[in-house]
Image: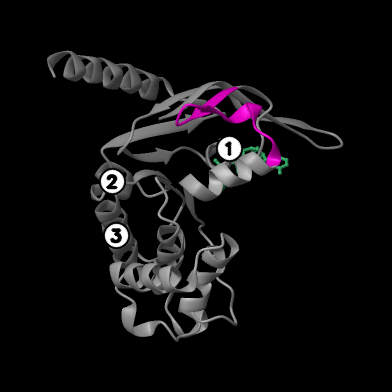
Amino acid sequence: MLTMNNISKVYQTEKVQTHALRNFDLNVKEGEFIAVTGPSGSGKTTFLNIAGMLEPFSSGQYTLDGVDVGGLSDNERADLRNQKIGFIFQGFNLIPDLNLYENIEVPLRYRGIKSGERKRRIEECLEKVGLASRAKHLPQQLSGGQQQRVAIARALAGEPRFLLADEPTGNLDSLMARQVMEILESINREGSTIIMVTHDPELARRAPRNIQVVDGQLADFTLYQNKQFEKANKLATAGA
Ligand SMILES: Nc1ncnc2c1ncn2[C@@H]1O[C@H](COP(=O)(O)OP(=O)(O)O)[C@@H](O)[C@H]1O
Ligand SMILES: [Mg+2]
């Protein structure tokens, strides 16, 4: 459902040209939970931003649910992103003077979702992340782990098929990190496809599939794993 072929991304600043991604190939199937690891500066965030259509790519082909992303206008891309993608950032990105309910509501309003439906989704998502009783709290009244759970609820309220998370546990202690991971796992069981960048090897190991980005490319073992994965899938399909 998500396919990248030969994707490259070049950042051009006054003096330097940075190849953040080069010849990047990836195939993601519906319902997968993928952990992305790799050294700092290797292109993980760039990959995630391109996957989430927050950034354009320089060359190559990116297909999402059969749609050629490179051929879309800015508006079409924004629509596709709104329909399909949920983003969780390391820094939570909550609005400090809005309470939890309102924070989750902002993107839903922006999408023109009616107030009754907004209320239903917000309550359901706060319940899912264990913060139903805190709807009226301000972000500053919560711990970092709780704030990250609000950010997850906000992403979930859009009912995304793809959840993209950039070091969602980067600012959390290990107990809270595990709690966030458990929430992501349960969301994945309910059917969302998840791609999570993480520095934490313990969390990465818990994900069913790991890929590693090194110097803007998938590391060799990942390519091997991809091939094995495709082979297993072919066998499964043939047997079905
Ligand atoms: N907006 C930008 N302008 C110029 N260079 C950038 C920009 N964003 C990222 N880069 C460069 O691209 C490379 C990959 O960055 P990034 O994707 O953020 O890596 P990671 O998330 O793995 O740490 C780095 O060398 C980084 O400095
Ligand atoms: Mg990063």
Give the residue drawn at x 31%, y 22%: 225
Residue 136, image x, y percentages? 44, 86
Taking 191 as reference, is 42 left or right?
Answer: right
Q: Classify mark 1: residues with Cα within 10 Å, few (<14), some (14-19) or many (20+).
A: some
Image vertical order of residue 178 relative to residue 24, above or below: below
Residue 238's quadrant in the figure? Answer: top left
Find out whether residue 230 is within the magenta segment: no
Q: Classify mark 2: residues with Cα within 10 Å, few (<14), some (14-19) or many (20+).
A: some
**Residue 177 appears anywhere in the view:** yes
Query: Upstream in the sequence, badge 3 or badge 1?
Result: 1
**Residue 169 appears anywhere in the view:** no
Do the residues bearing badges 2 and 1 touch, measured as CB atoms within 8 Å?
no
Query: Upstream in the sequence, badge 2 or badge 1?
Result: 1
Tag of residue 139: none
Tag of residue 183: 3
Gap between marks 2 and 1 measured at Cα: 22 Å
Tag of residue 50: 1
Query: Upstream in the sequence, badge 2 or badge 3?
Result: 3
Q: Which residues are magenta?
A: 61-74
Gap between marks 3 and 1 measured at Cα: 24 Å
Residue 127, image x, y percentages? 30, 72
Q: Secondary structure at mark 1?
A: helix
Give the residue drawn at x 33%, y 84%: 133
Find out whether residue 65 is within the magenta segment: yes
Amino acid tagged 1: Ile
Amino acid tagged 3: Ile
Q: Which residue is mark 2?
A: 191
